[in-house]
Image: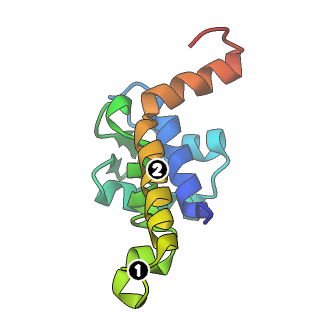
Amino acid sequence: MMLTRAGEYAVRCVLYLSLQDGERIVPKKEIIEAMGLPDAYLTKVAQSLAKSGLIQIRQGARGGYRLTRKPVEINLLQVVEAVDGEIFLNECVMSPDSCLRSPLCGVHQIWQKARQRLRDTLAEADFEQLGREELCENKSCSTI
């Protein structure tokens, strides 16, 4: 399983917004330039993030985006699933009825466990923490 391009762009967008003053509407062009995002993708991704309640979109000459919550209240799982949908590793985990062996299959249990661990790991990574790490990477911080 690979994160989709849209999912990656959503993470970059929210990461950039998490580094800004929460009240400031950040122009779309600023995010595009800072995070290396294609304009068309950002528009699509932002609509999904707004629909999920993670960002606010303001239209017009002074338009742009801003987070609707504090970065500590937003995690990677929320952002990825806002754009890509709920994470599943394979068909039998997503739809157990699709496989007659699911109730008996030992591998099915491993897929379920792996899925849950991935979801837990993404849920633990909030954007306040990720923003601090981003800043430290750019400034060579010795402590976080």
Which mark, by number, is residue 124? none
Q: Residue at x 46, y 45 (%)?
A: 122
Q: Is residue 89 visible?
A: yes
Q: Nearer the viewer, residue 94 or 84?
A: 94
| Amino acid type of the residue that numbered disc 2 sits on in the rendered structure | Arg
**Which is more N-terminal, label 1 or label 2?**
1
Which quadrant does the C terminus fall into?
A: top right
From the top left corner, tell me how far across and down residue 48 is, in percent. 38, 61
From the top left corner, tell me how far across and down residue 17 is, in percent. 46, 36
Few, some or many residues within 10 Å of mark 2 (<14, 14–19, 20+): few
Q: Is residue 27 visible?
A: no
Q: Nearer the viewer, residue 101 or 63?
A: 101
Few, some or many residues within 10 Å of mark 1 (<14, 14–19, 20+): few
Q: Is residue 57 left or right of residue 110?
A: left
Asked if residue 21 is positioned above or below residue 89 in the image, the reply reads: above
Which quarter of the figure has residue 93? Answer: bottom left
Q: Nearer the viewer, residue 6 or 77?
A: 77
Mark 2 = which residue?
117
Q: Residues at badges 2 and 1 in contact (C-beta under 8 Å)? A: no
Asked if residue 92 is positioned above or below residue 24 in the image, the reply reads: below
Which quarter of the figure has residue 62? Answer: top left
Please tell me how many numbered marks the rendered image carries.
Answer: 2
Asked if residue 78 is positioned above or below residue 75 in the image, the reply reads: below
From the top left corner, tell me how far across and down residue 107 is, in percent. 52, 71
Regarding mark 2 in the picture, which secondary structure is present there? helix
Q: Nearer the viewer, mark 2 or mark 1?
A: 1
From the top left corner, tell me how far across and down residue 51 is, in percent. 30, 60
| Amino acid type of the residue that numbered disc 1 sits on in the rendered structure | Leu
Q: Residue at x 46, y 68 (%)?
A: 88
Mark 1 = which residue?
104
Regarding mark 1 in the picture, which secondary structure is present there? loop
Which quadrant does the N terminus fall into?
A: bottom right
